[in-house]
Structures are given as C-alpha cells and as structure tokens.
Amino acid sequence: MDVAKLTSNLKTALIAQGIAFALSLMTSFIVPKLLGITEFGYWQLFLLYSSYVGFFHFGINDGVYLIHGGETREELDNGSIKSQFVLGIAGQSTIAVLIAAYCLLVVPDLDRVFVLIACCIFLIINNAAGFLGFVFQAINETKVFSHSLMLEKCSFLVELVFLVVLQVDVFQLYILGYVLSRFVALGYCLFKARTILSGDFIGIRLALTELFTSIKVGIKLTLSNVASMLIIGFGRFLIEGTWGIDSFGEVSFALSIVNFFIVFMSQLSMVLFPALRQSSKEELEKAFGILANLLNVLLPISFIAYYPICYLLSIWLPQYTQSFIYLAILLPLCIYNTKMDIQGTTYSKVLREEKLLLRTNIISVVSAILLGIIAAVFLRSIEAVVISMLLAVQFRAVFLETHFATKCKCNRSLQTISLLVISYLFIAIALVFGTITGIPLVLVLLAFYYVVNRKSLAEVFAWIKERIATK
C-alpha cells in the first residue's frame, strides 16, 4: 500500500470536504432561516429525490469502478470507457425525459412538479459526472475527483452567498443553483477525462456487451447503495406522506446537521478503496484494526456536541426546537452510518463481497420499512420512525463490522457492545435531562466508555505517536 499517495489523496479529499463543510453550515443553518419551514421542506424534498438519481445508471458507474479498480490511466481501454459513457448517458436521458413528461401530465402540485423536473435534469448531469468520477477513483486519481467536488461546492457556495445576501426566500432558485454547480463539476471532469474520451467508439454491439458486463458487475453495489439510502430515506418519505411537508422539514433539518459529517467522513472511504485494493492480506487485517480503534475511540466524542448545538440553534432558529428531539436520536445514527461507510462498505468492495453487502442492506431496508410502517400507522410517532431508522442502520453496521473483524482476526466485541450501550444511554439522557444536568451525565458516560475501552484508547495514542515519529 502506497502510504505517501494515500496521505496525499486524503489531504486533498479533506480540503474538498472542508469546503463542503462550510457549504453545509450555510445550507443547514442559514438557508432554513430565510426559507421558512414549508419552503425549506421543498428544498429538502429536492435533495431527497435527487439523492436517488444514481439508481438510474443501473450499475454502470459501479461496474466500471469495480472492473477497472487498481488500473492506471495508461492501462485503461479508452474506447470501451468512452462507448459505455455515451450509451449510458443516452439511455438515462431517455428515462429522464419520460419521467419529466409523466410528472407534467399527472402531478397536480406545481411546486412538487418543479422539484421533480429539476431532479430529471440533475439525473443526467449527476450520473455523467459520477461515471467519470468513478473512473478517476478506479485509477487512483482521487485528487481529480476531489478537485471536481471543490469546484462544485465552491460554485454553489458563491451562488448561495449571492442568494443569502439578497435574502432570496424562493426555494426554486436554490435548486437551480444546486443543479448548475453540479454542471460545473461535470465540465471539469470532461476536461480532465478528454484523453480517455478521445478513444475510438468500439461499435454498438461490442459497446453494448461491455455496458451489460459493467451493469452485471455493478448492479449489486448500486442496489446496495440504493437500499442503504432507503434505510433513512423511506422513513423520510413516510414522514412527508403521513405528517406533511412541515414535519418533513423539521426532521430533514435535524438530518442535515448530522449529514454533512457523514458526507465528510465518507471521503475517507473513497480514498481508502484504491489504496486497500492494492494491499496484501496482512496489510488489510492491520488496517481494519487501526480503523476500528480510531472510529470507536473518536466518534463517541460527538455526543458532547449535542447540548451546545441545541443551545445555539434555539437562539438562531427557535422554530426548529422540535428538531432537537430528532437530533438526539440521529447522532448515534451518524456514528453507525460513518462506521458502515468506512469499514463495512469499503471492505465489502475491497474483498469483492458485494453480494453480502447487498443482502445486508436489503435486510436492513426491509426492517426499516416494516418498523417505520408500525411506527407511523400504529404508534403515530415521528420519534418512533426515526428510531426505526437508527435500529436498521445499527444492525448493518454491527453485522458487517463483526463479519470483517472475524475475517481480519480482529476481536472488537467489547467495543461493539459498549458503543451500543452508551448510544442508547445518550439518547435517554438527551431526551430526559436539560443542559445543566445532561452535560455532566454525558461526560460521565464517555468517561465510563473510555475506561472500558482503555486498551483501544492506548492503541490509538500509540498509533498517532508512531505516525508523528515517522514524519
């Protein structure tokens, strides 16, 4: 494993996500101040719908990523890549046009029609940029992918600042800005991939064969990703359909607070894949132990942030005080989602266990759907719906962590059990106690956790000390 290149790629990815972090702060804390609950709800509805447009490449992007992972730019078959890119975008454009026509004819709510049409346009742009982004990641040019993200986030940040300064309270303009920023990323990716896309078209029959091969390889991972998103997404659809756009906006606001951290951490997963793909069995086992220790030691610290966040938001956005209840449940969800991205998903791809990942995600999403329906229909409780999301996310993270810990000969059962215990104790403390009593109790809870896991804590400090010494 090339540690120097991994470190360089990680630094670039972290800079990109630093920009994304600043953008997320604005979209999470300033945009809802301007839009109001209903308008913010439609903005969040667009973000929810647009997060599923990746399904419509039907595994092409993931297939190219898995098939060509570990190759260099010189080793790529440019003709095959170009042909799959052209055919894939043509097919997805056709699907987008059909969906848009259906929405115009059938959907009565004009605001919802706008959201859906914008998603159709976003589908084409996003999946084209995503295809090229996966190619860059596969050939370990993650810096190029990170730079495209920087451009995308910076362009949207500029647009957002402009809208905020003018105090624009029309959600449609925010959506247009979001779509335009993704188009900027696509333009950059097309420029950086110009030598790859300059290859000769290989002919329709061979191109279709290559395309269906990529679909066959990648569809399991694509379905896994969609199922993964539906674990949280179905609950949000359920809340919007049962309690309306305002309640959906309140839950989405709480999710937006934790989501930028989840997205930030997922960049580590992106950088790790090509590095781990080139690693030996011994290096994979060692890396898993290090990752498990780092995540289990560092992630619970986020519990301390709950009360300060709630206090500041109660001053800035008092209309969203109901969201603080959901945030208490979503913080543990954030921890387990992060563990899943970095450990479960990454090692599933590296060890080519996409079938296991798909089965795990399907079981999790079915559980989330059943529990969510019970919570919405019988319990009539939004809090119960959010807890159903947490349970499903925890199941898949714990299951895959245990599976790969066994394969990597790395026993982490004490960490797993103790983290589950303090997660639910934190939720209980946050929902029952106010700031004055809650903060000391959370600190005691974390102290107990670190005493129980003192061996892992010592290993983390030793690893950090070793990293510093080698520089």
Image: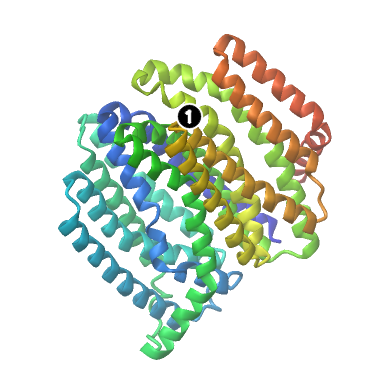
Residue name at image x 32 percent, y 74 percent: 91
Say how many tags the image has. Answer: 1
* Spot occupied by residue 2 in the image (x, y as percentages of width and height): 69, 60
Residue 192 in sight in this render: yes
Residue name at image x 68 percent, y 53 percent: 400
Please tell me which residue lies in front, 397 or 447.
397
> Residue 317 occupies which quadrant of the picture?
top left
* Spot occupied by residue 390 in the image (x, y as percentages of width and height): 56, 39
The disc labelled 1 sits on which kind of residue?
Tyr
In this picture, is 137 found above or below 39? below
Please tell me which residue lies in front, 87 or 228.
228
Tell me if 15 is positioned left or right of 345 in this view: left
Please tell me which residue lies in front, 96 or 420.
420
Residue 5 in sight in this render: no
- Which residue does the numbered mark 1 point to in the structure image? 326
Q: Residue furthest top?
A: 436
Tell me if 227 is positioned left or right of 8 in this view: left
Please tell me which residue lies in front, 366 or 168.
366
* Spot occupied by residue 9 in the image (x, y as percentages of width and height): 57, 54
In this picture, is 83 found above or below 325? below
Classed neighbour count for the residue bearing mark 1: other residues with Cα under 10 Å, few (<14), some (14–19), many (≥20): many
> Residue 89 occupies which quadrant of the picture?
bottom left
> Residue 427 occupies which quadrant of the picture?
top right
> Quarter holding the N terminus?
bottom right
* Spot occupied by residue 207 in the image (x, y as percentages of width and height): 41, 85
In this picture, is 224 found above or below 21? below
